[in-house]
Amino acid sequence: MNRILMLVVLILLVLYLGIGLMLYFFQEGLLFFPQKLPKTYSFSFDEPFEEMEILTESDVLLHGLLFQTENTKGLIFYLHGNAGALDSWGEVAPTYTSLGYDVFLLDYPGYGKSEGKISSQAQLFKAVQDAYNEVKKRYQEDQIIVLGYSIGTGLAAYLAANNHPKKLILQAPYYSLVNLIRRKVPIIPSFLIRYPLETHRYLKDCTMPVVLFHGAKDSLIPVEHSERLQMEFKKGDTLIILPNQEHNGITDHPDYKDHLIALLP
C-alpha cells in the first residue's frame, strides 16, 4: 500500500514539474496572442494616419501608427492589450484626436507588421523604450501622455517610471502580473513567472500625475488590483471606477469620455 502511495505521489510530482517546465519555457504562448499582418497590409481608418517604422537597437523593425490632428495639444503614446494588432487597436484613436491630441500606437514584437517575437520582459521593455525614443524626436516629452491598457499597463508604468512624460493613464491595470496569475492559479510558484510586470513597484517611481481607470465589473483583472495600487499613490494621483464596466470597451464608456475632457484640456 505504501509503495502504491509513493508511486502516486511520484507521478503527481513528475506531472507538476512537467507542467512547471512547460509554463516556464512556453510562457509567451500563454500570455501573448499576436495577430500577424503581411507587410503589404493596407490599413483603413476614418482618421488620417501615418505608418511608422522603428529600428530597435537589436535591429528588429517595429511598426506603429501615428494619427495626427491640426494644432495638436500633445501626443497619446498608447500601449495596447495582449491580443490583436493595430488594424483593430487603431479604432481607439478618434477618442483622443477628437480632443485635439495626436495618437501613436505600437505593435509589440511579433504583432501586426512588427518583426521578431517577444522573448523576455527585458526585451519587451527595451522595444517600448526604443519606440518612445523615436517618438521623442517629434514631440517634446512634456507633450507626451503615456497610456496603457490591460497587459500594456505594466509596460506603460515602467516606461513612465524611467522617463518624464506629462501624465500616465492606465486602463484596467494589474497590481503585478505575478499577483494576477497566482490569484487565478495559486499552485504556480512566483519564480516560474518570467514576466512579473510589477506595476505597483513602477508607480513608486512615477513623478508625473497618474490616473487609473477600472471597470467595476471587470472579471479578468478585478478592480481590487487598482484599489491596491492606490496604496502607491502620491498626492494628486487618481483612481476612477467606471460603473457597470467589464474588462473590454473602457474607451467607449460614456463616463470615461467625460473624464478625459477634464484630464486632457
Image (spheres, helix red, strand yellow):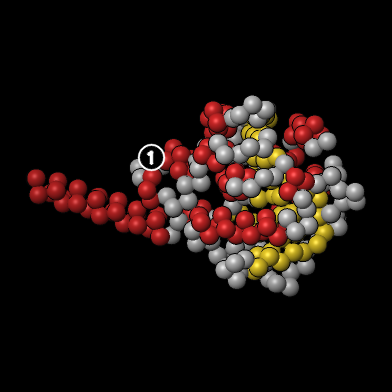
**Is residue 161 rendered to the left or right of residue 21?**
right
| Residue ID at (35%, 45%) | 189
Kind of residue indicated by mark 1: Pro
Q: Is residue 57 above or below residue 79?
A: below
| Residue ID at (83%, 36%) | 265
**Is residue 96 rendered to the left or right of residue 180?**
right
Foreground of the two, 112 or 96: 96
Foreground of the two, 183 or 261: 261
Rendered location of residue 4, percent (x, y): 13, 49
Dividing the image into 4 quarters, which one contains the N terminus? top left
**Is residue 223 rendered to the left or right of residue 48?**
left
Q: Which quadrant would residue 110 be assigned to in this image?
A: bottom right
Residue 245 visible somewhere in the drawing: no
Q: Which quadrant would residue 127 be assigned to in this image?
A: bottom right
Q: Secondary structure at mark 1?
A: loop
Q: Is residue 168 above or below residue 132?
A: above
Q: Is residue 257 above or below residue 14?
A: above
| Outermost residue to the bottom | 40
Rendered location of residue 119, percent (x, y): 50, 62
Rendered location of residue 240, percent (x, y): 67, 29
| Residue ID at (78%, 53%) | 139
Q: Mark 1 = which residue?
A: 186
| Outermost residue to the right | 70
Residue 197 visible somewhere in the drawing: yes
How many marks the image carries: the answer is 1
